[in-house]
Image: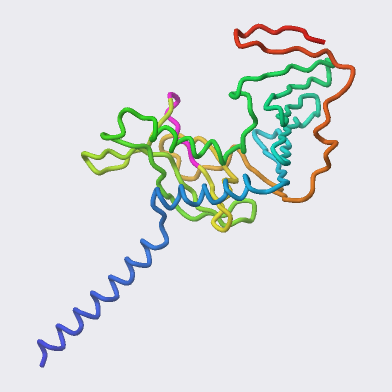
Amino acid sequence: MKKIGVYVIIIIIAIVVAMFFKNITTTKYSHADIVDLINKGKHSMDNVKNLSYEKENKGITTKYYFKNGKKKMISEDNNNIAMTLEDGKTYIIDNKNKNMVIFTNESYLISNSLQEYALNIEKINNNSTHNNKYKYAFVYIRDEKIENKDCILVKECVFDYETKEYSDYYNSEKQTAIYWIEKSTGFVIGGAFMEFGNNTPTPQTIIKNIKFEEIEEDIFELPNGYDVLEMKDNGQVEKIK
């Protein structure tokens, strides 16, 4: 009977331990889970008629507006404005010097900020010639709250297929890109570069005041009376008006 009692106790302990570890693993996110969450937020942003938010970086706030394919970015001092309109061209407007430069190169298009930037990791994986040896991946660090929003904090890592291990992916300054992703929406609302050995990073870039309210059309009107220049493919700027 004693042996039976011991076995029962062992079984109970094993069940409790298994449930404990199950609860731990379900609170974490795999790379695929994180990508799905970011894509959820991107889909929400890409499929609305009106979107606006503010990006705060190093104490400077930039306002973004998106409406039916039109995009606008306004600097804090209102001197510098960038707009991408239905014609696919991007207009850089300098209110201080009363001039406007037109870019036709797609690299100058305004993107959905941290959302697009975070997903670059998937573009690199899809285009990499080393994808049979290693891949770039997001690794969950912990749950964390910023701007009164429940987020997950994740970092960019490299996964080695041979060793089956993750290692931090550092840039030339020994920093790892990290992101705060809101759990409920998938919006990437914080970003930073974490230095080696820093376990308590703070956001360097914060996305706030995300709104889906109606944006007036006149916010995308180009100014009159400005000198108009165009950036050519060869990098030369030509005055056209």
Residue 16 lies left or right of residue 204; in this view the side is left
Q: In this view of the protein, which residue sits in the foreground, 116 or 208?
A: 116
Give coordinates of residue 20: x percent, y percent: 33, 69
Q: In this view of the protein, which residue sits in the foreground, 231 or 187?
A: 231
**28 shown above or below 197:** below
Scheme of image coloration: rainbow
Residue 236 picture quarter: top right
Whether residue 58 appears in magenta in the rendering, the answer is no
Residue at far right of view: 225
Give coordinates of residue 7: x percent, y percent: 15, 83
Whether residue 175 appears in magenta in the rendering, the answer is yes
The quadrant of the image that shows the N terminus is bottom left
Q: How many marks?
A: 0
Residue drawn at x 72%, y 13% as measured from the top left: 230
Give coordinates of residue 76: x percent, y percent: 77, 32
Q: In this view of the protein, which residue sits in the foreground, 170 or 236?
A: 236
Q: In this view of the protein, which residue sits in the foreground, 101 or 26?
A: 101
Residue drawn at x 54%, y 54% as measured from the top left: 151
The quadrant of the image that shows the C terminus is top right
Residue at far front of view: 87
Residue 47 lies left or right of residue 218; in this view the side is left
What range of the chain is rendered magenta? 172-178
Residue drawn at x 32%, y 72% as measured from the top left: 19
Residue 227 picture quarter: top right
Give coordinates of residue 88: x percent, y percent: 67, 27
Residue 55 picture quarter: top right
Residue 119 lies left or right of residue 158; in this view the side is right
Residue drawn at x 49%, y 49% as measured from the top left: 153
